[in-house]
Image (cartoon, helix red, strand yellow):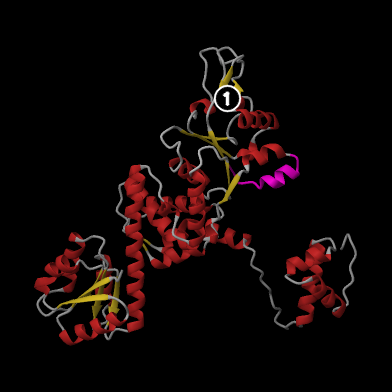
Amino acid sequence: MLKKVLIIDDDQLVSVSLKKALTRLNFNVEICLDAVEVFESIRNFDPDIILLDIYLTTHNGLEILKEIKIKHTDLPVIMITGYADVDIAVNAIKNGAYDFLLKPLDLDQLNTVLKKASENLNLKREVETLQEILRQDELTPDYFGKSGKIQRIVKTTQKLAKSSDTTVLIEGESGTGKEVFAKFIHQNSPRKTANFIQINCATIPKDLAESELFGHEKGAFTGAAQKTKLGKFELADKGTILLDEIGELTQDLQVKLLRVLQEKKFYRVGGEKEVEVDVRVLAATNKQLEDEVRSGNFREDLFYRLNVAKIVIPPLRERSEDIPSLSYSFLAEFNKKFQKNVTDIDPVAMDRLKEYPWKGNIRELRNVIERALLLIDEEKILKPHFLSFMSDLYAKGDKQSDKFTLTIPPSGIKIDDVIKDLILKTLKITNGNQVKAAKILGLSRSKLRYRMEQLNISVTKNFD
């Protein structure tokens, strides 16, 4: 759908020329030549963006800006003027202008600003939708982001959710939202009217883990003298249970869990009567369970029971296009929590968020927005608001990145010396294994051997 732009300028020649230019750029444009008719034009046309001249013949554009922002808080207004006055520009921004442009307008610059304003508007509308979703406690596909990568995973998840019993293993780094995907599966499954029970296997004390999962009878152990306790599996009967951080379960509990998956039955701690349950099991982990199986930390038979279907959630740094919508969603959440009215994130600040590697993923992004909102008094988050407490994180992110940097000495260096040093250092890392070294360097084995012969490099195991 074309974005609607309302031009408020009493210079007819400029307005008509601008309308023609913006129409060619695929905007739907209307003109308001009389300042008296501004609000009638806004009501009738319902624009997405306004271009407002500061110096109108009968009215002050800054005063009109103030009135527009009172009545239409989220409507982006771009101020235009033929006079370069820093004080006026600052005043316009303080009063809620999205941007400030000088006449004669550079069409490329105007197009860029209009597109950014459109993107910002789209994000705010998405946030409103997400807020409504959160109020209803219902997750929809749009909640997870708009990137192609995440939407493909969402579609797969929807298909898996239709089954009533299929066990799903959800893998992903810490903070990627595995728990939310599990809840989404439950809400889209035939079990959605029953309980969704979540338990973090990494946080259960080992001596209480069996009781937490399967319950205990009165007097089963010290501290169990009061009454019979139902475990998480019984509480999830007819519904869904999420075993978060499943890789942290002890070997003993892995055996008991395997039996529950196979037979849908278990004994409470200290119990003599079998308890039968009808539960769909979802498991989540930030570990590679295949590696845990190979190392003997996780039972192979349990792994195959859990891994009937698998979803791998990508880290946030691999879908940076989702960062704006997630950021504005968190902005809305914390505005409500802290009773603030921070309406925007500056584009430069947003670019900084997109550049950051996000080792903590969505959880880390949420924390960053929360801290920024808590500390600022302005109505817009700017780049310094992030840098004031993220400088160490950026430095850390740079140190942890996989980017290669090369320092050139002032005297210069021969390219063959650089290549030889690079190969030697890589062979040292791989203990002389040429296959692994070739893989690290992005070369074929034969190409590496050719380079080694060319540079007179010989190597053996236990390379020093």
User: Residue at the spot x=82%, y=64% of the render?
Assistant: 428
Q: Give residue 128's quadrant in the image.
A: bottom left
Say if 83 sits above or below 332 in the image. Answer: below
Q: As drawn, is 171 to the left or to the right of 413?
A: left
**Quick one: quadrant of the C terminus?**
bottom right
Region in magenta: 284-296
Say if 78 sits above or below 244 in the image. Answer: below
Q: Position of residue 459 (x, y in %)?
A: 89, 68
Q: Nearer the viewer, residue 29 or 63?
A: 29
User: Residue at the spot x=85%, y=78% of the render?
Assistant: 455
Q: Position of residue 452 (x, y in %)?
A: 85, 75
Say if 449 sits above or below 292 in the image. Answer: below
Q: Nearer the viewer, residue 435 or 276?
A: 276
Q: Residues within 10 Å of mark 1 (few under 14, many from 20)?
A: many
Q: Can residue 85 be found in the magenta stretch? A: no
Q: Amino acid at mark 1?
A: Phe
User: Residue at the spot x=68%, y=74% of the render?
Assistant: 407
Residue 104 in view of the camera? yes
Could you tell me which secondary element the residue under label 1 belongs to? helix
Look at mark 1 in the image and give the residue it sits on. Answer: 214
